[in-house]
Amino acid sequence: MEKIDFSPVGDTVNGMAIQIGIVMFTGAIAFILVYILLKLIRVPKPLANFLAIAALLAGLYYSFTTNYLSWVQSLVR
């Protein structure tokens, strides 16, 4: 049985993994910061959760569209 050589795609897959990690890290940081700030000003827990999730989604969207998509498009060209 022959072994398949995946070395040509190794750099691309590693770059994609790093980029998606950055996207997820950005969303997590946005969630944590907003949640902590809302708890410090004593916002009720359900509202703090809702607003922190909205910040998470906004952070994921912004990071995905500005960082990840531009990197993937540079691979296609």
Image (cartoon, rainbow, N blue to C red):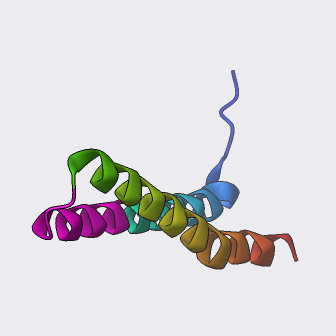
* Residue 1 within the segment the image draws in magenta: no
Q: Is 24 left or right of 9, judged from the image as shown?
A: left
Q: Residue at x 79, y 73 (%)?
A: 73
* Residue 16 image position (x, y, % from top left): 59, 61
Residue 43 seen by the camera: yes
Number of marks in the rendered image: 0
* Residue 12 image position (x, y, % from top left): 64, 63
Q: Which is nearer the eye, 53 or 23?
A: 53
Q: Which is nearer the eye, 56 or 45?
A: 45
| Region in magenta | 28-43
Q: Above or below — where is 69 with respect to 6?
A: below
Q: Residue at x 44, y 60 (%)?
A: 56
Q: Is 55 left or right of 64, judged from the image as shown?
A: left
* Residue 37 image position (x, y, % from top left): 20, 71
- For the C terminus, give its image quadrant: bottom right
Q: Above or below — where is 57 with respect to 40?
A: above
